[in-house]
Structures are given as C-alpha cells and as structure tokens.
Amino acid sequence: MKVQKQNKHLSINLVFVTGNANKLREVQYILSQGQRPIQIDSHDLDSKLAFIFHFPEIQGTTQEVARAKCQRAAELLGGPCITEDTALCFKALNGLPGPYIKYFMKSIGHDGLNSMLDGFPTKEAWALCTFAYSSGPDAEPILFEGRTEGMIVPARGPATFGWDPVFQAEDTGKTYAEMTNEEKNFISHRYRALDKLRNYLESL
Amino acid sequence: MKVQKQNKHLSINLVFVTGNANKLREVQYILSQGQRPIQIDSHDLDSKLAFIFHFPEIQGTTQEVARAKCQRAAELLGGPCITEDTALCFKALNGLPGPYIKYFMKSIGHDGLNSMLDGFPTKEAWALCTFAYSSGPDAEPILFEGRTEGMIVPARGPATFGWDPVFQAEDTGKTYAEMTNEEKNFISHRYRALDKLRNYLESL
C-alpha cells in the first residue's frame, strides 16, 4: 500500500506492512479522515512482504516487539514503512497477555479469555495499538501508541474481528464488535495511535 | 561451558548457552551421570554470549523458539552449541502460556498462575524442556524434547527456582520445589530432554 500525501508537493511513498484485510480497511478509513486526507492505495504483496509476514515476531514488551518488526521491515524493503501491533492487556495480569493475545485468542477463544479472569477481582483491560514508522533502513523507528481503557466481558456482537466481542470500551456500554465502524474508530486504540501517526506524517 | 567426551579419541567442544546458574548446575549434574560421563567445564561468558543473552527470543511454538535460538547461537559462536528452552503448558489453555511462562511468572507469580486456572475445570499441566544441538552455523539444529505431566497447585516448597513450587509432578505427590535434586532429576522434563541429548552426543 502506498501512502501519498496530497495538497503538498512532497509525497511520501510508504508501505503499510500488514496481511490483515480488516486492519487495512480500518487504517484506510482513518487516514482518509482529517483536514488533509492521506490515501492508501492497495498494493499486491511481493516476495519481500511475504517474507516479512512469515518472519517471526520477537518476544518482549509491546515497544520492543513493534520496534524490531518495523526495523526489520525497513531493512527488507529498503525504504520507508509503517507497521502495526495490537495488544490486549489485562490489569489482573499486569498487562499480559499483551503482545501474545493472538495466541490466547486462537487457543481458547472468547470464553477462555473470560475464564482466565474468573479467579481475579478485576476484569479491567486496555487495548493498545502501536504504529511504528521508519523512514528507512538506517533510521530508528518512531512509535505512536494509542490506548483504550475497558473491560473483558462475555462475547457480544459479531465475531468477525479477533477479540472485539469481549472488549467493552470504557464509557460506551458496548463491545468493539457492537459498534459501527464510525463509533469504533472514534474511540479505538487503533484510531488513537493512527491519529498520532497521521499528525506526524502531515508535519513532515 | 565446554563439553568434552571422555573415553573416546573424539572430543567435542560444545558451548552450553545459558545465563542461569541453576540450570547450569542441573545440566552439569545430569550429564555427569550415566555410563560415560560428560563433563561440563564452567566458562566465562564472552561478549558473543552476552549478545546472545540479550538477543530476543522469537514468538512461536516451543519448537520454533528453540530452533531459532540454537541457529542464532551457532551463527554467532561460529561453532557447535546447545541451547535450552523451558515451557510450562496448561491443558485448559491448550498449551499456553508455554514458551511465554517466564513473563507470566514474573508478572503474577505463583498465586497468579493458580488464579488463571480458577475458571477452568482442569488444572492439568505439563512441563516441557527442549534442548537444541547445532553442530555449527550451517547445520540444522536437532531438538530433544522432554515432557513431564503434572498439575498446577498452590505453591509448596522453597521458592528458589521459578515455577517449581506450583508444579506437582504426576504420581509423586510433590511439587518440583519439594523434591531433592536427585528426585527431581529422575523425573524432570529437563532430565528427560537431556537424557536424549546425552544419548545422541555419546553416539557421535
């Protein structure tokens, strides 16, 4: 996907490294909002990108995971890129499963994520999105974090997007899965991170 | 640490990549048993090894994690080496936390590991040790797995070695922490993996 800046002579060719069509749509939507829309053109994956998708993530904090992935992607692509990482952090587990949530979601599903918290007094959680931007292989990636508070609840809403049905965002009474795209984008961890990234890219 | 084979003309110089003194002692003990003892000399860490310790593990299955670490170590050391990985797998979580157990142990401790299972009908678990041996940078690592069945219980015994106090090994009525070294080595996941490795090394 190329990001092209409009209304300015400078344009940035930027690859968004993702294999997730849902994330791509969400990111396209959010970057198209704002005073100076940034357009993402979809783009066939070449072999370098396929390699990135199969290259394993590292273990570590969400920041370490994000930085390593973006750095590796920039080296492989030989140019600027953005990457995205999502974590779901349980207060009772001091932030875990965090970057490992995908394994837990796959292994035990929505019911299991709830059961993991049965023995703890708090069901509080936060969704954390980390966008990383690298201007190229020799640059240190810059991180943009977005965080949304909430709690883990029994699944409600369509089960089309990972753990969305079990995360009820604070002050909404709704799970992510019960929200329209507009509602979700307005408060989501991904929106908040992407908004910071958009502001940064617009300032370049 | 160098492993030197005795009673044979062939000798293998082999580095055991670990920063954990407890594991080193356990491995030294187990390799010193058997018909043809393998001696491990302790060995100051050089900068390459320090780098390995700080190089992050990858995310993935226990086999993927072990293979990647051993491969990386062999490339950095430029010679043969063994690495070790430990996982604690909860049946209720379909094998998780698995290779991520160290983060859960650090974040929520013995009580938390028990609480995570409160909402599930089974407390069954297995301890899994994976030794990987690489004959050098161009070789594919060979894996040796040892598995011990058991269950997660409230902590009993000295809290000196990770999750040992909460893992009760099947048919023993004791947690790992309540066992003598001899008792533990006889049935431990690490012993079983190391026994396979020792047999392999002796056959070279």
Image: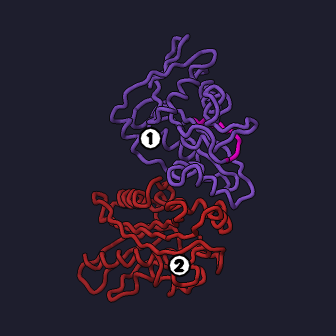
Chain colours: A purple, B red
- Find numbered disc 2 in the image and state the secondary structure of the residue it sits on: strand
Query: Which residue is identified by label 2?
Result: B169
Up-down relation of residue B171 to residue B150 (above or below) = below
| Chain containing the residue with disc 2 | B
Q: Residue visible at 59% across and 38% down?
A: A130
Q: Mark 1 packing: few (<14 Cα in 10 Å), some, or many (20+)?
A: some
**Where residue B144 appears, x then y in whole percent?**
36, 70
Q: Residue visible at 53% across and 78% down?
A: B169
Principal secondary structure, stretch drawn in magenta: strand
Callout 1–callout 2 Cβ contact below 8 Å: no
**Where residue B10 appears, x then y in whole percent?**
24, 78
Q: Which mark is residue B102?
A: none
| Residue A162 in view here | yes
Q: CA distance from mark 1 to mark 2?
A: 42 Å
| Chain containing the residue with disc 1 | A
Q: Which residues are magenta?
A: A142-153
- Find numbered disc 1 in the image and state the secondary structure of the residue it sits on: helix
Is residue A147 one of those drawn in magenta?
yes
Q: Quadrant of residue A195?
A: top right
**Where residue A4 appears, x then y in whole percent?**
49, 18
On-image quarter of the C terminus of chain A: top right
